[in-house]
Amino acid sequence: MSSGLFLVALSAIAFGTLGVFGKLGARAGLTLPLLLALRFGVAAVLLIAGLSAGRRLRVPSLRSAAAVALMGLLYAGQAACYFGSLRSVPAAVTSVLLYTYPVIVTVAARMLFGEALSPLRVAALAGAMAGIVLIVNPFVGAGRLDPAGVVLGLGSALVYSTYILSGSVLLRSVDPVAATAGIAAVAACVFAIAGGLTGQLRPFQPSGWLVVAGLAVIPTMLAATAFLAGLRRVGPSLAATISTLEPATTALLAMAFVGESLAAWRWVGGALVLAAAVLLARTTVTGGRAGAEPSSSAPRGS
């Protein structure tokens, strides 16, 4: 159990570096398509090399390949929204907005599958909504967030919710590490094509390569593999709880490395959203459903 706790915590902290790497990439002159094409491309190559070294590389069936391709497109959409949001709002805000995905999954499960909403889950939903209002705070002119960045942050949560619900069905028979490699490869191709079509595959500062290497290894390879390994040991409910270290890590690293800070009301709003995410995950597992919990079939990521 202790090793599982460590692995999930390590994963959350590693995922928490995403926002900082995204900010540093922009400062190094990396356009969004180029940054993400390199991130996913390098990660895919390293993951495939690892699978090959472990003799786990297999030719997928047509159905599995199609499922991975669809998941790769969703992953690319989620990453585009997340990193697009980072370009105009604080990293901690983007990270917390992503963590509204349990709310979206819970509402979708209610609408699509008729899943019951207990009083605790209704309270969690209300708390999350209050937290979002505090984070966005449209009533105060000073410190008001860029609306486009907020929409993109919430969009990343919406696409990620679709990714989780789809992955729990489409990837049941696919090895998670192999799926992660294939999804990363598809996402890399999507961003390379998008960058080429829009003329955004441009030279950048040499320091950008350090950002690309860090982004591919720490919040992509290390975070995803540590989460999958830890999830098997501690289960989805505890993993979801520990994973809320991610936004806190993002906030602290953003203050330390990019000089960002948040007003007190946004800290309160973030705490409400994360508390709601934990409550929804734990009540979901207690109720025996798969609504808002992380799925072992769909590789975790941002």
Image: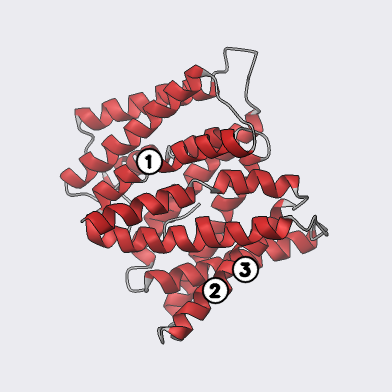
Residue ID for mark 3: 41
- Circle 3: residue type: Gly
Query: In the image, what residue occupies the spot 48% across and 43% down?
Result: 157
Disc 3: CA contacts within 10 A as few (<14), some (14-19) or many (>=20): many
Horizontal side of residue 55 vs 73, given as left or right: left
- Alpha-carbon distance for marks 2 and 3? 9 Å
Instruction: Classify the position of the N terminus by image quarter.
Output: bottom left
Quarter where residue 148 is shown: top right
Q: Gap between marks 2 and 1, in whole Å?
A: 27 Å
**Viewer-proximal residue, 234 or 145?**
234
Asked if disc 1 and disc 3 are in contact, CB closer than 8 Å, the reply is no
Q: Is residue 283 above or below residue 168?
A: above
Say whether disc 1 or disc 3 marks the residue closer to the N-terminus. Answer: 3
Q: Quadrant of residue 138?
A: top right
Going by the numbered disc 2, the residue's amino acid type is Leu
> Does 6 appear above or below 149?
below
The answer to whether any part of residue 183 appears in the image is: yes
* Element class at badge 3: helix
Residue at position x 43%, y 60% in the image: 224
Q: What residue type is labelled 1?
A: Thr
Q: Residue 244 carries which label?
A: 1
> In percent of the image, x 42 and y 21: which residue is there?
268
